[in-house]
Image (cartoon, grey):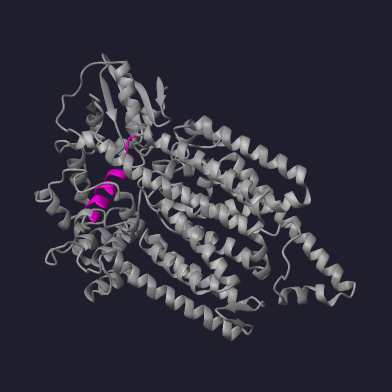
Amino acid sequence: MSRRVTIALCGALLLVFAALSYAAVASKSPTYDEPLHAVGAWLHLRDGDFRVNPEDPPLWHYWMALPNGRGALRADTAAKMYADVIDDVTTQWYFVVETLYRTEGNVEASSAFFARSRFMMMLLGVALGGVVATWAWQLRGGVAAVTAALLLALDPNFLAHAPLLKNDVALSLVAGSLAWAAWRAGRRLTPWNALALCLLCAAAVTVKFSGLLFGPIVALLLLGRALLPAPWPVLRRLLATRPQKLAASAALCVAAAIVSYAGIWAAYGFRFSATPDPNVRLNVAKLMEYTAANDLTRRSGQAPTTQQVREWQPTAPPRAIESLMARRALPEAWLFGLLYTYQSTLTRETFLLGRHSLTGWWYYFPVAMLVKSPIALLLASLAAAGVGIFARGVKLSGDVGNAMSGDPHRSPHAASQAVSREPPQHAPPWSPSRDAVRCAPRGWTALCLLIPPVVYLAFAMASNLNLGLRHVLPVYPFIFVAIGVAAARLWRARPLAAKRGIVALGLVLAGEAIATFPNYIAFFNVAAGGARGGLRLLGDSNLDWGQDLTLVARWQQEHPQVPLYLAYFGTADPWAYGIDYVNFNEMYRFGPVDQPAGRGPGVLAVSATHLQTVYGEQRTRELFAHIRRQPPIEVLGGTIYLYRYPQAVRR
């Protein structure tokens, strides 16, 4: 496969990805979190005020807010509601809804406001595809690049989340780029790839707080490189001894830490205060109360009393954050956001396989990956593992045979001590895999493909934040690259079988992507029963994230005489979409609460997340469990279930 053909195929696949993902999201209303991120990002860039949405570092906010100028929205920053956010960060949701949907002129402007930001986020998804393809290309040539690009371009989960105003795909881009930069540094450490490694570490901690994990991950990778027996070209020296390589690794880790620290300050304009007014400080004491309540709930399984919250003694993480805040060691908004994230992970309502929990399950993410990954990806992963095991077995048997035949240059010991001198026979002179293989020590590629996803997934499994597959999206780029490498190995050994396998992979992936369009957020694979099957498996951003108000509006236009009772899970205002409704059981938390009891028989539209009662009291859970047992008359987008009212609520 020539360079030109490889670039053309990868480019075409990424164009398909861009078109599908953006067209799909354009047909959807904002998901639950998007209004908060959109308004927060705009205020961060416009005013340098971080009181709204401090729970997310702002680097990706700046990127998505770039196309929205100062006049993109009208925001009353002099209102009491805006000031209240300082005292209680949870009131930010009401300010955001008021700004977007209840301020004159903003409803009309909001569609373009979201579209511009979503386009910017979609570009990050395309960039991730470019990183995945390029790294695979440098590892094993064009076949690996095209296969890896194919897997990402037609994966419904990346098609769903890439254009959303959320930082999961942005962090995936940083994760893949960081591992790639580490891999290049492990082959030969130059000033440029050392700088790339340091800057990407800084990007990780200014995109998402789970990016803090990439510091230890990079340290583990560099430690692994130092312990490998092969010498390490560092700048203009060849380090051959273990102490020399350990010293180089430690120096690079220190440099990455310094750049990351400076990067955090730079992201907040080298200012400690979260607002332009240094006298206006975020209410850390109130956030500590939330932390206390969640910590006590985690320990006892029930809500604590006010007295228990007052007597609570902070654990080590909040004490450390308070200490850093007192010393102004890091920006106030970053530390406040870190504490907010920490307290939200202590307890959080979650749903899995029909059960509810406040602390989640260790197997939540493995189950989510099994039911939400495309069938083609699961089969390709198994095939890639088989190819890797077979190739490893062949390599070991060849080494043993060479050792027994008396060839000292091909013994296992000699092979482990040397860096490969020649590129593989399949690599043409122009191939980027030529220089890569020449300089890559044995085992280094495997470390770079295994350590980051394994550590990240292990941490996710140990946490209590079981909200959606999106939280482990940074694991997937490594899977795509590994499958691409396996495909290239198979191509070298059995070209016809590899061609057929890649074509079949592409056809099955395309079938899943086309059949699911545009409902990618609600995607579940065929074995899991699709979106209908997902209702009993997973909730929240795995299925219903409030994205289908547009379908409700279209349904009401087609049935204008039918009274609509709506139990909506989301922050977007149904009235902004022209929906005339009764706020059933006050389930839309920002909606009217003083409506008349009813308008006679009609249709009850219920968001899937409410049907699962992921969030709600026992009384609400029993009500929706009863409704869920009734046959729906229609399902919109896989997330909005329509029932006859009042028949569905009668017991």
- Residue 30 part of the magenta segment: yes
Nearer-the-camera pick, 631 or 131 = 131
Which residue is at a point 30% across and 55% down the rendered structure image? 62
Q: Is residue 197 above or below residue 141?
A: below
From the image, which quarter does the C terminus lie in? top left
Q: Main secondary structure of the magenta part?
A: helix
Tell me if 529 is positioned left or right of 643 in this view: right
Query: Residue 100: where, in percent of width, then height?
Result: 21, 40
Nearer-the-camera pick, 179 or 435 = 435
Tell me if 165 is positioned left or right of 454 in this view: left
User: In this picture, which residue range is highlighted in magenta?
Assistant: 29-45
- Residue 633 part of the magenta segment: no
Which residue is at a point 25% across and 18% down the rendered structure image? 563
Task: Please identify the quarter of the rendering in which residue 605 is found.
Answer: top left
- Taking the view exactly as shown, the residue that stands out farthest to the top is 561
Query: Residue 423: where, in percent of width, then height?
Result: 72, 64
Query: Residue 29: where, in percent of width, then height?
Result: 33, 35
Q: In this view, does 635 lie above or below 388?
A: above
Tell me if 271 is positioned left or right of 402 in this view: left
Q: Can residue 351 be seen in this view?
A: no
Q: Is residue 219 above or below residue 616?
A: below
Query: Residue 587: where, in percent of width, then height?
Result: 26, 35
